[in-house]
Image (cartoon, grey):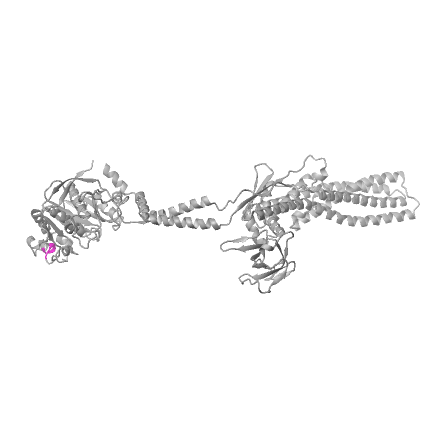
Amino acid sequence: MEEDTRVGQSNQPLSIDVKRILYRVLQYWYLVVITLGVALLITFFKTRYATRIYPVTASILIKEKEETSEGKLLYNNPLVSGFRNYINEPYIIRSYPLIQRTLEDLNFGSSFYKQGNVLTTELYDIPVKARILNDGGQSNRKFYFTVINNRQYQLSPNGDEVQLNKQSNVFDFGDTVLFEGLTFFFELKKSHSIKEYEKTALVFSYKRPALITGDYVSRLRVSWAEEGAGVINLSLDGSNPTKEIDFLNGLIYQYQQYDLEKKNLAASNAIDFITEQLTGISDSLQHVEQQLERFKDQNVMTDLSTEAQRLYSKLELLEVQKVDLIIRSNYFRYLAGYIQESENLDQIILPTSVGISDGILTELISRMVDLQLQLKMNTKLENPLVSESRRIINEIKRDIVESVNNQKVTDKIKLDYIDKQIRDIEKHLNYLPLAERKLVSIQRKYSLLENLYIFLLQKRAEADISKASTTTDIDVINPPMQAGGAISPKPATNYLIAAIIGLGLPALLFVLLELFNTKVQSKEDVEKLSTIPFIGGVGHKRANNNLEVLTTPKSSIAESFRALRSNLNYFVGQQEKSTFLITSSISGEGKTFTSINLASVFALSGKKTLIVGADMRKPKIFSDFNLSNEKGLSTYLAGIDPFENIIQKTEHECLDLISGGPVPPNPSELLLTKRMDDFIAEAKKQYDYVIIDTPPMAIVTDAFVIASYADHVLFLVRQNYTPKGLIRTVQDFYSSGKLKNISIVLNDIYRSGPGYGYGYGYGYGYGYAYGYGYRYGSKHKNGYGYYDDQPSIRS
């Protein structure tokens, strides 16, 4: 059950080895220190020379309508109390036209700068004021400006060297100058000293206000103080708090002017319309007056009879009603034509200005005017409210047209009834004498024009009073002021971010190296990929030959092979003679090195040991002992030489060698012959241990053929060389039963520590501790004078 669990784990994707990453961080601590130091140094200079940003805030109150005031004409006149959608007010304040008008009024398009070695600083409070009279179609311009004295200054094109000793481009303050395509003049501000700026080259910059409007729109924040309140908070962050305070003051002033203009627009239009009507009526009234005077001069009768006076009084009342209907008809005709033809819907005349007191129509027109004004303020904003406002305006226009048509139908019925009554009275007038009829006719015209003239005079007077008494609904609650110290840069936050980046970049590098490393690094990697037992590890070879154990028997590598020899006893038991097969997945993983040195430790312990070079395709193990390859395994299996003739003695007692022999054309077929069985049987008869060096498993199948003769198979994995995918391949062979009695050796361990699984230390003689779970106890002296450690299982 335990084995099944491990197999399931081996099929899971690899996880990152945190211990190995931490070990690399400690190993390359200097890289972390350098990265951290560079990040902190960059942050220091960035914080030192960064532009300080300060917050500026203000609050304004948008008053509601006065509903209960006794002075209705002054405070609640429909001419100046239009519809207000409070939700849209923040968008109006941040609108491009309003902010651009503010910047133009404040002359923010013209700026002076002082260039430093690192920073260029704006001089907002410089005692020189610039006025651009004509920009010549240029939207952006820069040149040098140098004060010579309190009367003169010098200009130089941007990029040219400023030379004060030359009198070229020297001008007087207050004179109009044409320079670099700009027409302008510079003047000194009163009660300001220019001494500190003399002989200093400043940079004058001109930008068309439309170009800097977007920057202020993006930086300006407008929000209601709380839901249901009429207070709006304005805030702005900038490098020059004095300049930003002036901007908010200018913006509030322009917003108040916009509010007044919006209120006065209807009254102004009504005054113009009524004045135009009065001009025509005045001429007609004067003509009728002259006509009445001539009649009185030519006729003795100047008074009407009782019957005529009665008819005239009744006719006069009807004419007054008819005048009212005529005025309404004219206004409706004007209104319908204006809506259909004009685009400036905010300049329409309200019904109340001509005495039409229709609440629904007045509210519809007021709302349409308000939305049209908002559209003008938001034309440059990519705002969904713009398209929504256009849709609502179209709906309101349809409602107004429908309401006007309904009013026309009603007025037509009234006018027809009044005309019928007037015709009846005119029939009775025909019975009067001719002189009386003429006098009634003249007085009738005079009364009609007089009433109309007085009515229009009254309406114009109301409009004049309303316009004169209009006040803005915008009050300043908290004037613009600096709200605390600099909010940027933030040294503590910047240094914290720098520390995170300085530590995080190398850590990320090590994580990426670990993540994309496809080579085996440690015992843990092997155990994650395979359930094959792990038998031990061998350190990195530093000598030029493979005879490490024989040449330096006290080295750490020699001790690792002695440990490997001891661990093999737990796999083969206490049998006197054993055969071990050394193989790997690909070439270069140390099979020959391991075969020679494992055989050497067996030989040094006094056991007769035979090394068999079973790689008949590329035989090379003989060269390490300076022996011949004329005879070997291939000649024996081919029946050319007997077993005794292919054995070669080495310089070391108890250690013999059988090389691969001449390369045969059919090495795999030779291994399948019966002579291979005889070879293994003869080798076991004469030797205590037989070490077989085979070709790589992933390349040829020779190792699979020979594995059936071995008591145990050692599969080599080389650190930072063997691909992890090949471990999964040998795991499949092991799980399917193709390879049995196999264990894995981690070879060429040159990197040790946490996450790598092995560390070599030395106590007495050759004492060491391994990460694979064994410790060493008793020692006994072998026949060669070396101490041989015997393992015991760690409790």
Q: Is the stretch drawn in magenta largely helix, strand or loop?
A: helix
**Range covered by the magenta-colored residues:** 631-635
Lateral position of residue 90 relative to residue 760, left or right: right
Q: Looking at the image, how many numbered discs can be counted on the residues?
A: 0
Quarter in which the C terminus is drawn: top left
Q: Is residue 654 among the parts visible in the rendering?
A: yes
Quarter in which the N terminus is drawn: top left
Residue 632 among magenta residues: yes
Residue 508 picture location, percent across and down: 36, 47
Nearer-the-camera pick, 422 or 229:
229
- At 57% from the left edge and 37% from the top edge, which residue is drawn? 227
Residue 161 picture location, percent across and down: 54, 63
Lateral position of residue 792 relative to residue 111, left or right: left
Residue 123 among magenta residues: no
Nearer-the-camera pick, 170 or 628:
170
- At 7% from the left edge and 53% from the top edge, which residue is drawn? 643
Residue 596 picture location, percent across and down: 15, 51
Residue 515 picture location, percent across and down: 32, 47
Q: Is residue 76 among the parts visible in the rendering?
A: no
Lateral position of residue 48 relative to residue 728, left or right: right
Nearer-the-camera pick, 550 or 77:
550
Nearer-the-camera pick, 291 or 259:
259
